[in-house]
Image: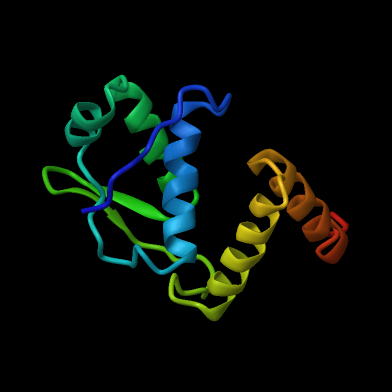
Amino acid sequence: MFAFRIDRRSGVASYLQIVQQVQQALRLGLLEPGDRLPTAREVVEATALNPNTVLKAYRELESQGLAETRRRHGTFIVGTLGTTSAESPWRTELEDVAARARAAGLERDDLAALFTAVLDALYPPKDPR
C-alpha cells in the first residue's frame, strides 16, 4: 500500500505534499492506473492530518485527471505521468552524484538548488503564447 510522508517543517502545505508524492510515484511507475490510494481515514491515522486536508489533496488529484473517487470504493489512480522507472539507470547515476556531493560537504538544499539551476538551464520555461 502507498504511504504518505508529511514533513511539517518543509513549508509546503500538507495537501500539496500528498499531491506531489502521488505525482512523483506516477512518474517513477510506483503507482499505475487502477491502483487504489489509501482512504482518507487511513491517511489521517498514519499522519495525524485533518481529514479535510487529505480530501483537498484527492480533489486536486482529480482536477488534474490523475485520480477518481468512486463512492464507497475509494480513490483510484486513473492517469499517468512520465515514463521513468524507479529502477532506471538514471537513478543510479543520480545517487552517485548525490553521494559525491554529500561527501564533498554539500547540504541537501545546496545540491537541490544546483540541480534546479541545471534543470532550469536545460529545460527553459515554455513560452505561454
User: What colouring does the structure picture have?
Assistant: rainbow
Camera sees residue 125: no
Measured as percent of width and height from the top left, residue 122 is found at 84, 66
Name the residue located 28 percent from the left edge and 28 percent from the top edge.
47
Q: Nearer the viewer, residue 91 or 22?
A: 91
Camera sees residue 64: yes
Name the residue located 42 percent from the left edge and 58 percent from the top edge.
25
Q: Which image quadrant for residue 79?
A: bottom left
Measured as percent of width and height from the top left, residue 18 is found at 42, 39
The C terminus: image quadrant = bottom right
Name the residue located 64 percent from the left edge and 43 percent from the top edge.
108
Q: Is residue 45 above or below residue 106?
A: above
Q: Is residue 96 above or below residue 57?
A: below
The answer to whether residue 83 is left or right of residue 104 is left
Q: Nearer the viewer, residue 40 or 71?
A: 40
The answer to whether residue 51 is left or right of residue 96 is left
Name the residue located 57 percent from the left edge and 64 percent from the top edge.
95
Count of number-bearing discs: 0
Q: Residue furthest left?
A: 72
Q: Is residue 89 above or below residue 56?
A: below
Q: Which image quadrant for residue 30?
A: bottom left
Q: Residue furthest bottom?
A: 89
Measured as percent of width and height from the top left, residue 24 is found at 48, 56
The N terminus: image quadrant = bottom left
Measured as percent of width and height from the top left, residue 99 is found at 60, 59
